[in-house]
Image (spheres, coloured by chain):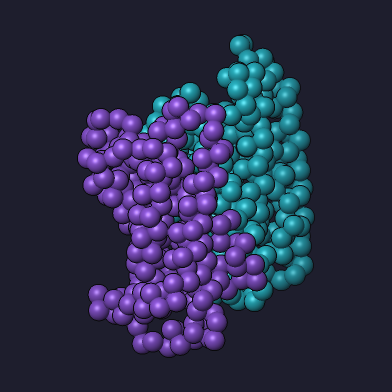
Amino acid sequence: MDQRGQARLDEFLGALLFAGMILALYMAFLQAPREKTMGDLQRIFYFHVSSGITGLTAFAVNFAASVMYLVRRNRWWDHVALSSAELGVMFLSIVLVTGPIWAKPVWFVWWTWSPRLTSSLVLWMLYVAYLLVRNYVLDPDRRALVSAVFGIVYCVVFDSLVAGHPSSTHAGDRRIVAVHAPGFLYVLGSFSDLVHLSPAPAFLPRSVAAGGGVAAAACGHGFLKGAPGLWKRSTP
Amino acid sequence: MPAKVWTIFRKDLLIELRTKDSLNAMIFFGIVVLVIFNFALEAIRESIRAAVPGVLWVSFAFSGTLGLNRMFAAEKENSCLQGLLMVPVDRGIIYLGKMIAACVFMLLTEAVIFVFSLIFFNLTVWREIPYVVLVCLVGTLGFTAVGALLSAIAANTKMREVLLPLILFPVVLPILVNAVEATAIILNTVDYRQLKLPLTIMTVFTIVFATLAYLLFEYVLED
C-alpha cells in the first residue's frame, strides 16, 4: 500500500473507531439497564472485561509477531510486537485498576490472591519487564531478537496460565462476549489514541486491534474455557 | 550430546572450583538473608516453623540470582563468550551445560543454607530430608532452566546486574509458589500425598521451559 492509501485507511479507521467509542460509551452508561444488586457499579464490567480480552489478545498478537520475527527477520514484525506489548500492558493496567475498584464494595477487599488475579498481575509484570528489557538492549537487531525470544517464552507459559482458570467471577462463558460488546468497541476506539506511542505505522495497531477484537470475540469462549488450570486452588 | 553437555558443565565446574567466586558469595548471602529474616519474623517466633518454607526459598532464590548473574557476566570478561560461541556445538548444548552447572551450584548452596536454617530456627528434621531433597532438586531445576536463559539475555544489556532479578522473578513465580507449598507440606503436615500436585506443576513447567529455552537459546547468543 502506498503512503497516501495508508494515510486514508488510517483516517477511515480512526473515524470508525471514534464513532464506535461514542456508541460504546452511550451503550455502557445510558442504554444498558441498571443492575439489580450492584447498581451502577456493575457498569465497570463493560470496561474491565473488554480491556481484559483486548489485553490478552494484544499479548497473543505479540506472541505471533515474535514468532514471525524469528522466522522472517523483518523489522516490521518487531514493531508489531512492541506496539502490541505496549497496548497489552496498557489494557491490563486498566483491568488491574478497575478490578479492585469493583471488588472493594462487592467482595469487601481490594485484592485477593486468587489464581486468576495473581496470574493477571504476574502477566502484567512480565510485559513491563519485556518493555524494560527493550530499553536496555542498545543494538536494534539484538533488541528485536531478544524481545522476540521473550515474547514467545512469556506468552506460552503465561497466557495459558491466565486463561487456564476460570473462577466463579471470571467464568468463561459465551454470553460474556455478547454482553461486553459495547465496552469492547470502546476499547477498540482507545487503541487509536495509543498508536502514537509506538514506532509502527499507525494503521497497523488499529488493524491488529480490529482483527484481534474479532478473533477474541470469536474464540473468547474457547480461550477462556481452554487450557486446564495449572493452579488448582479455591477462588472467591 | 550428553558428552558435549558434560564438557561445558565441566568447564564451569572447574573454573568455579578453582576460583570459588560465586559459590562463596552465594552461600554467604543466603545465610545473611536467613539472619535478616530471623529478625523480620521476631513477632512470630513461636510459630516460626510455618514461615520457614517461604524464608528458605526466598533465600535460595536470592542467592541463586547472585550466581546466575555471574554465569554469563563472567564469560564477557576477556571475550570468553566469543570463544564459547566458536565451540562447534549446537547453542542449545551450551544452554544445557550452563543450566546444569547453575543447578549444581545452587543445590550446593541450598544444602548449606538448609543446615543453617535448621540451627537458626531450631528445627528437627530427619525423616523429612529425602522429600526436601526431592523438592529442592525439582524446584532448582526449574529455577535454573529459566535463570540460565534470562541470565544470557541480561548479560548482553547495559544494566545486567539490575535487570536479571526484574525479569527473572516474575517468570519463576510458578516455581517458587509451588516449591514453597511443597516444602510447607513436608515440614508442617503428615500427608505427603499432597506433594503430587506441586511437584507435577513444577516438573511440567520445567520441561516446557527448558525445551523452549533449548530451542530459542541460539537467538539469544547470536551476534
In the displayed structure image, the side of residue A224 where residue A184 appears, left or right: right
Position of residue A130 relative to residue B188, above or below, is: below
Horizontal and vertical percent position of residue A83: 65, 58
Position of residue A139 relative to residue B118, above or below, is: below
Task: Determine the colour of chain A.
Answer: cyan
* One can see residue A62 in this view: no
In the displayed structure image, the side of residue A93 where residue A71 appears, left or right: left
Position of residue B42 relative to residue A62, above or below, is: above
Q: Residue at x 77, y 67 (%)?
A: A4
Horizontal and vertical percent position of residue B145: 39, 61
Horizontal and vertical percent position of residue B36: 55, 45
Location of residue A225 (image quadrant):
top left
Position of residue A99 relative to residue B57, above or below, is: above
Rendered purple, the chain in question is B
Horizontal and vertical percent position of residue B130: 23, 47
> In what quadrant of the picture does the N terminus of chain A appear?
bottom right
Q: Residue at x 28, y 50 (%)?
A: B133
Location of residue A45 (image quadrant):
top right
Location of residue B93 (image quadrant):
bottom left
In the displayed structure image, the side of residue B115 where residue A102 appears, left or right: right
Q: What is the count of numbered marks? A: 0
Q: Residue at x 46, y 65 (%)?
A: B24
Question: Which residue occupies the foreground of this view, A64 or A149?
Answer: A149
Q: Residue at x 58, y 56 (%)?
A: B166
Question: Which residue occupies the foreground of this view, A83 or B47?
Answer: B47
In the displayed structure image, the side of residue A196 where residue B56 appears, left or right: left
* One can see residue B53 in this view: yes
Question: Which residue occupies the foreground of this view, A107 or A1?
Answer: A107
